[in-house]
Image (cartoon, rainbow, N blue to C red):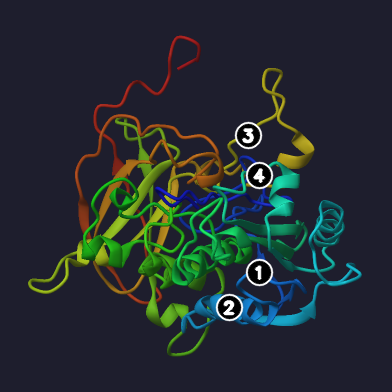
Amino acid sequence: MRAPPRAAALLLAGLVASGVASAGGPLVIQTSGEPYTWGAATIQYRTDGGPLSASVNNAAAIARVAAMFEVWEDVPSASISYDRAGAITGVSDGNVSTEAEYTSVNSSCLAGNQSPIVFDEAAAIFIALGVDETSVIGFAGPCALDPAQGRILSGIAVMNGLFQDGNGAPVQDLSPAEFNATFVHEFGHFSGLDHSQVNWECGFAGCGTDNLAGLPTMFPFLVTAQQGTLSIDDIGWVSKLYPAGGGTGFSATHGTITGTIYFSDGESPAQLVNVVARRVDAPGGADESRTTAASGVSGNKFRFYHSNPITHPDPDFFGQFRSENPSHIGFYEIPLPPGDYMIHVESIQPEFTAWSSVGADIVIAMPGSSPGPIGPVTVAAGVAADGTDVTLVGTPPRFDQFEGP
């Protein structure tokens, strides 16, 4: 997660590796096309026994972590919950402060034995790992997965105390609200959510009140402390992954728009196109097309990496992730509250790669151009608005001289 001019990048831990992450929703996808989610009714995490920083003691850090998790737990349409199980195990003094201690704790996480939240008071762990302690606020993600059940078994987060030490050097502190917003974002990854590209202009230029109101917590950059409050996009996706029941549950409060993005031939699906559904604006008041918007990425369920004689991706590793079902190529889905929406398509921003990736660790420019907004599409609670397809304009041919017709 990056924050110009004070950068904050995201590093995913353990099995969440290059090319595995999805976007605009679930972080890791099973071979069935369904997301990996936590199976436990309540996610148990453990906290470091040391201070977060020179100015934030252990008790205060633990309280802040609990409040950050509570942002996700308090979504009425979602069933996810968290509980502190106690202190991190396997460290004699409870304070994870050296590379060896971190390696031990991370190994325990990779084995699925605990889900540690590490306070790196002076960034010693970041330095030991070769991570730039002056630009990385923290990292988080699942550690261990159960492919047979499609479950996340454990996760980890590491918090860089330099950004809260009160010194202003070697990095300028974030405000407490900015730091908290960063880790609400990171705990979204911990929970199985990936980055979302909605109102991307906010990361690069002037934003405006309405754009900020619709900016996701899971946006790749930290733009404002306001991202500590969940957007429509964040709420929809965490609720789809962990749906609550009853009158305030997901089916009672959300529907889904689904469709496929095509090349100009109307037959060949296009991968890694960002799709944004924007509420049709009502006269007066805030601009709902900017405040009420959510996204998905075309083809995020389909496997991008295939073992071949040229690139040799590891079939044993990548074979655990994403679908080979042809119907998932170019397919997108977006959970939304009821209302009328227009569908917009756009390229994923070229800056959103590697640790800030949206869709994959590579960026493919959208072929051709958008046909303009599609719709309006009416979303009703508990209903999928299927077949909301978009055909791009002026794309190059799907096949070239190196392929058969």
Image-based side of 90 in relation to 47, left or right: right
Residue 186 falls in which quadrant of the image? bottom right
Q: Residue at x 71, y 30 (%)?
A: 313
- Where in the figure is residue 304, as x and y percent of width and height? 58, 36
Label located before the other in sequence (2 or 4): 2
Residue 213 falls in which quadrant of the image? bottom left
Label located before the other in sequence (3 or 2): 2
Of the residues tagged 4 and 3, which is closer to the observer? 4
**At numbered mark 1, what does the secondary structure look like: helix, strand or loop?**
loop
Marks 3 and 1 sit apart, C-alpha to C-alpha, by 39 Å
Q: Are dots 3 and 2 in contact, CB under 8 Å?
A: no
Image-based side of 138 in relation to 298, left or right: right
Marks 1 and 4 sit apart, C-alpha to C-alpha, by 18 Å
Label located before the other in sequence (4 or 3): 4
Marks 4 and 3 sit apart, C-alpha to C-alpha, by 26 Å
Determine which residue is flagged by label 4. 131
Vertical relation: 211 (above or below) 130: below
Determine which residue is flagged by label 2. 64
Q: Are dots 1 and 2 in contact, CB under 8 Å?
A: yes
